[in-house]
Image (cartoon, rainbow, N blue to C red):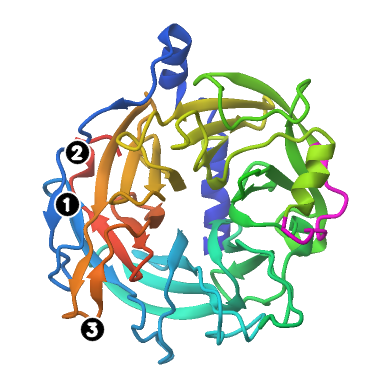
Amino acid sequence: MNRRAFLRHAALAGGAAMATPFEALVARLAADGRAGLVIDGYGPLSPVRDDTTGLPLLQLPKGFRYLSYGWTGDPLDDGARTPGSHDGMAAFPGRGSRVILMRNHEGTRGPAFGAPVYDSAAGGGTTSLEFDTARGAWLGARARLGGTLRNCAGGPTPWGSWLTCEETVFEPGPGAPWRRRHGYVFEVPVDGDATAEPLIALGRFVHEAAAVDPATGIVYQTEDARQAGLYRFVPKHRDDLSRGGQLEMLAVAGRPRFDTRSNVSSGTLLPITWVPIDLPDQSGRDGSGVFEQGARRGGATFARLEGCTFSQGRLYVTATSGGNARMGQVWELNPGAATLRLLFESPGPDVLNMPDNACPSPRGGLVLCEDGTMNPCVHGLTDEGQIFRFARNNVVLDGSHHGIEGDFRSSEVAGATFSPDGQWLFFNVQRPGFTVAVTGPWARGLF
């Protein structure tokens, strides 16, 4: 079976599951409203030295180890330098025990790196990394798409490609360095080369992440703005987004322009519908043009939507600054039932400090990356609504590695994704910019 067929088969198998992975949490919310119980998880965190550099870059539970790779400035396979601002990421099966990671770089001003290039003046884009899970070894990295801007997150497709999303709507013009319009989604095949042409029909707005429903091929997209929408793109031809389709915005049925940002109780179930976006390329001067089109037709407002991921037929979305404490919400969308449910709301930064990227755990629940500025962590949210810290940024450098010096403990963690065998968790520390592969005694905990 080739990789494309394998990915489609695995995604459909996961999407066909009948039960939501959060049934226990939903039942408890219905009974007594409790959610977000803080637990130890795998145990207390303490500094652990990186197998690559020997530096204590992370705090982890006892028994876990990691290898860093792909630091900003490291040589890629073609001799070019690794760009910085590491962000969203996804893992794909390679040959044998190999894993291919598609990794975003949230760069701004160029010059562009790699090839193909969309805009020579833009410094963001995508690289790919290869890791052997059997040997526990990094194998190489190369540029896959350059000349884009603020490639924050994105998402994998069931047909074996990475959707990389621009978190800006910068324009060319007098005084601006850009040569082309920005604010789009680009598709980068895991096998083969990207076209460096935007998927305009998916909309031009401040993109964050994308997730494809493996059962239908519909692409869900988040918007990272103070007033944000949740969008879906219904393609004319499944597996070929370049052939166009219809962009739509989520609305709460019977409650036009519903505001989800605060005063929504955990467990609240909302019926939803979708309103069309007629002009997906009309972003407006401040990037809110697509949102305003949907809002005029009754679309719902969210607070800084960032991470989104599919698991067992459900879409999970993080609202980074949502909730009464403005510390984050986790939403569950059931496409088949056309419902939206608030699963979790952080009561304060000591529990969860602004969740960003998210991915499903092979052992149940979700992995959440923090975007806050207080020693950002990787968290686990179990299917029973328990939350725990798994990893904490511990990066303080004295110049001994690559000449980098500084305290980077406030830098966000991003791009969490598991290897297909579930034994390695990969994620990024955005500044100074590197990727880690973490493994250990998964079976003793809740990830």
Q: Secondary structure at mark 1?
A: loop
Among the two numbered marks 2 and 3 on one chain, the one whose residue lies closer to the N terminus:
2
Residue beneath disc 2: 42
- Residue in the image at 40% along x and 84% along y: 76
- Please provide percent x and percent y for residue 221: 64, 49
Mark 1 or mark 3, whichever is nearer to me: 3
Q: Report the amino acid beneath label 3.
A: Gly
- Residue in the image at 78% along x and 44% along y: 248
Q: Main secondary structure of the magenta part?
A: loop
Contact, mark 1 vs mark 3 (Cβ under 8 Å): no
Mark 2 or mark 3, whichever is nearer to me: 3
- Residue in the image at 67% along x and 77% along y: 196
- Residue in the image at 41% along x and 13% along y: 28
- The magenta segment is 275-287
- Please provide percent x and percent y for residue 105: 48, 70
Among the two numbered marks 1 and 2 on one chain, the one whose residue lies closer to the N terminus:
2
Task: State the CA–CA distance, disc 1 to disc 2.
Answer: 10 Å
Q: Is residue 296 left or right of residue 380?
A: right
Q: Is residue 356 above or below residue 199?
A: above
